[in-house]
Image: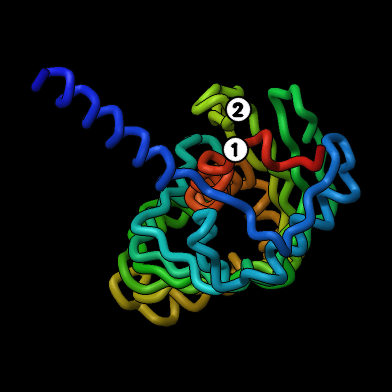
Amino acid sequence: MCKHDWRLSILRIFYGLSYILACDLPPEIGKCKAGDHVCITRAMNDVIRLYPDGNPLFKMPNLKLVKLDKLIVSKSDSKAPLQLNFQLFDVKITGLDKAKILSAKGFEKDTDYHEVEFQVPFVKMNARYEINGKLLLLPVKGTGHGEFTHKGLHVILKHKIALEKRNGKNYIKTIKLWTSTKPESSTYEFGNLFDGNKELADATNKVLTENSQNVWNAMGEEFSRGIAQVIEELVLPTLECLAYDDFFAE
């Protein structure tokens, strides 16, 4: 009898946890029919517009100020003229609350792939950095505070998923997430480069900023992986706690 009661108690605990951990979209977010990507794009923009400070009911984070412990960007091709191998710590990102969703694809009831295209007018990142790289023949090394801005950041997010059953409903399980990114322009400000040699540091930051498109072309894949890491921190908790079946209108 005691053994039966113990098992029943465990079942009740797990049932209670599954209820607590479940998320629900608020009623002010209109649901769309599966495959209606015009409506789905509009609903995504509604979420950003209504909840720039986040919403704990469905694990949406604060978009006005995103914080990450660590972000890594590394390019080690010895033949490349530009190598910026750096780590960012105590990262603070602002501007994502102004993101605009441009299009969405793959939001069907039976799917294994989503794609979302969006643009952010202005993104600023502040962080402590460690860098050890190369600009042409000049070694670039330093630690300090960095500030980086990207204007007109265009992002295509691709999300490979599987649907798994929990409590009789389908939930998203992430298989792979990757991004393609391109800003209209960027500015780079690595403080304390070259052991505090201000003249050399200012010249390096100026070269990186004035040639920001070339920098992005050379480091785009690495930067995109870094942005994918940011999006994983932001989006996946929300997507994976909402029942995918509940995304859509009947």
Q: Check disc 2 and give the amino acid type.
A: Asn
| Quadrant of the image occupied by residue 201 | bottom left
Q: Say which label, 2 or 1, has the lower sequence index.
A: 2
Q: Tell me where residue 190 appears, x and y as whole percent.
A: 44, 71
Q: Residue at x 60, y 23 (%)?
A: 162
Residue closest to the far left: 2
Q: Residue at x 79, y 30 (%)?
A: 108
Q: Tell me where residue 188 appears, x and y as whole percent.
A: 55, 70
Q: Is residue 140 visible?
A: yes
| Quadrant of the image occupied by residue 213 | bottom right
Q: Which mark is residue 47?
A: none
Q: Which mark is residue 170?
A: 2
The one of 207 and 131 positioned closer to us in this rendering: 131
Q: Is residue 83 visible?
A: no
- Is 209 left, or right, of 190 in this rendering? right
| Residue under pointer 1 | 243
Quarter of the image for the C terminus: give it. Answer: top right
Q: Check disc 1 and give the amino acid type.
A: Ala
- Is 37 left, or right, of 56 in this rendering? right
User: Circle 2 sits in a helix, a strand or a loop, which is it?
Assistant: strand
- Is 201 left, or right, of 243 in this rendering? left
Q: Residues within 10 Å of mark 1 (few under 14, many from 20)?
A: many
* Cα gap from disc 2 to disc 1, whole angstroms: 6 Å
Q: Is residue 233 above or below residue 13?
A: below
Q: Tell me where residue 7 appears, x and y as whole percent.
A: 20, 22
| Quadrant of the image occupied by residue 34 | top right
Q: Are marks 2 and 1 in contact (CB under 8 Å)?
A: yes
Q: Tell me where residue 239 appears, x and y as whole percent.
A: 58, 43
User: Circle 1 sits in a helix, a strand or a loop, which is it?
Assistant: loop
Q: Residue at x 56, y 25 (%)?
A: 168
Q: Is residue 247 above or below residue 45?
A: above
Quarter of the image for the N terminus: give it. Answer: top left
